[in-house]
Image (spheres, grey):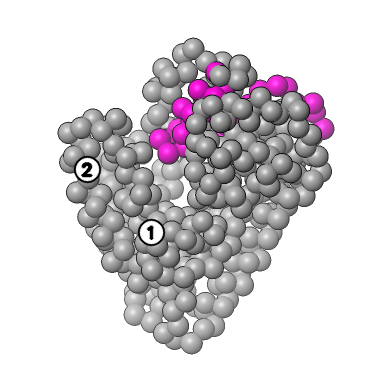
Amino acid sequence: MTAALVHDWLTGMRGGEKALEVLCELLPDADLLTLVHVPGRVSPTIMRHRIRTSPIQRLPLVDRFYRHYLPLFPFAIEQFDLDDVDLVVSTSHCAAKSVVPRPGARHLCYCFTPMRYAWDQFDHYFGPDRVGAAASAVARPVLASLARWDRRTAGRVDRYVAISHYVAGRIRRYYNRKSDVVYPPVDTEFFQPDGRVPEGYLLIVSALVPYKRIDLAIDAARLAGLPLRIVGEGPERDRLQAHAAESPVDFLGHQTNEQIRALYQGATAVVLPGEEDFGIVPVEAQACGRPVVALGRGGALETVRDGVTGVLVADPTAEAFAGAFRSLPGRWFNTEVIRRHAEDFSRDHFARRMRDVIDQTVAAPEGTTW
């Protein structure tokens, strides 16, 4: 059986790419199809596959501005030739799930989320306060059209697997499809406690994009009078740095995995201020034995045990988060208990579950749709 992996874009090793990396190990002979590939940004395991890119790869400045070509993604993803492929495994938060398999082939989609900006988070990305009134007005019909296309092509997938029950609900709502749930992999062998005493700072590890609500955490740190360190890059960095001018915040930019692990190990708590579909960072932090302060919505309800491995904050306000930050000195968190909880999301667990799902999908009678 010939197989192909389809991934939205290969521009860095974030949570989606870590799941893709395990799937590359499970399907070592599969071609890897992607809209855009920036060489040197992904792991050797992924690079060992034959990588095929879309026509977008040839457009100007694609390594920096690939997101600006969003209106072209539907056309580009449909250009891939899969006539000789029996099994398609897509890993999708944008367009990958809409690839066109040949008749009779199986298509399994590991869905990170239906595209947020086209469905329910338009204002976070393209609202007037983000891009200006004129650009927002132009973007709205484009994104509405993209949402219709996303819904119309949902039937190209035979079986959906969601990264969380929260995302399974989004798949049901927007695609009218059921899905299994397999939590994404966390490298719990790499991320471990080191026994150090916390150094008194709060930590965010995140892409600097609007829906992450990092501005909220900056305001909360200022109200609580606690230092906040932020790891990550993204289009929001300049705006966030200006917003943090009067706050005890350090922007650390890109950090290596080893540096991030050390930052987790030294943090008083790791902060998740936005509503996440799953959230790899909270689990990595817990694997290092550190508690998490997270908004009590979305994937955090599945990864953080309130009062045991962290604090779930009811309201998405700076005041509510500042209150949670101030409460940390009076709380006692057991490092070993936090660590054991994180082990439920291990890389090995993900690999076993996805191997079972792939085998079941291949063995099912032709025409089966889950």
State the separation of the CA atoms marked 2 and 1: 21 Å
Left or right position of 184 against 101 = right
> Mark 1 falls on what kind of element?
helix
Report the residue marked by disc 1: 96
Report the residue marked by disc 2: 139
Residue appearing at x 39%, y 23% in the figure: 239
- In the picture as drawn, the residue positioned furthest to the bottom comes out as 365
Q: Amino acid at mark 1?
A: Ala
Who is closer to the viewer here, 33 or 247? 247
Q: Position of residue 288 (x, y in %)?
A: 73, 39
Left or right position of 38 against 195 = left
Residue appearing at x 42%, y 74% in the figure: 158
Q: Position of residue 360 (x, y in %)?
A: 56, 78
Within-10-Å neighbours for mark 1: few <14, some 14–19, many 20+: many
Chain part drawn in magenta: 195-222
**Residue 363 vertical position relative to residue 29 in the rendered view, above or below:** below
**Quadrant position of residue 98:** bottom left
Asked whether residue 30 appears in the rendered view, the answer is no
**Quadrant position of residue 224:** top right
Asked whether residue 146 appears in the rendered view, the answer is yes
Residue appearing at x 55%, y 72% in the figure: 358
Mark 2 vs 1: CB contact within 8 A? no
**Residue 26 vertical position relative to residue 18 in the rendered view, above or below:** below
Q: Earlier in the sequence, mark 2 or mark 1?
A: 1
Q: Does 213 appear in magenta?
A: yes
Q: Position of residue 117 (x, y in %)?
A: 34, 47
Left or right position of 338 against 351 = right
Q: Amino acid at mark 2?
A: Ala
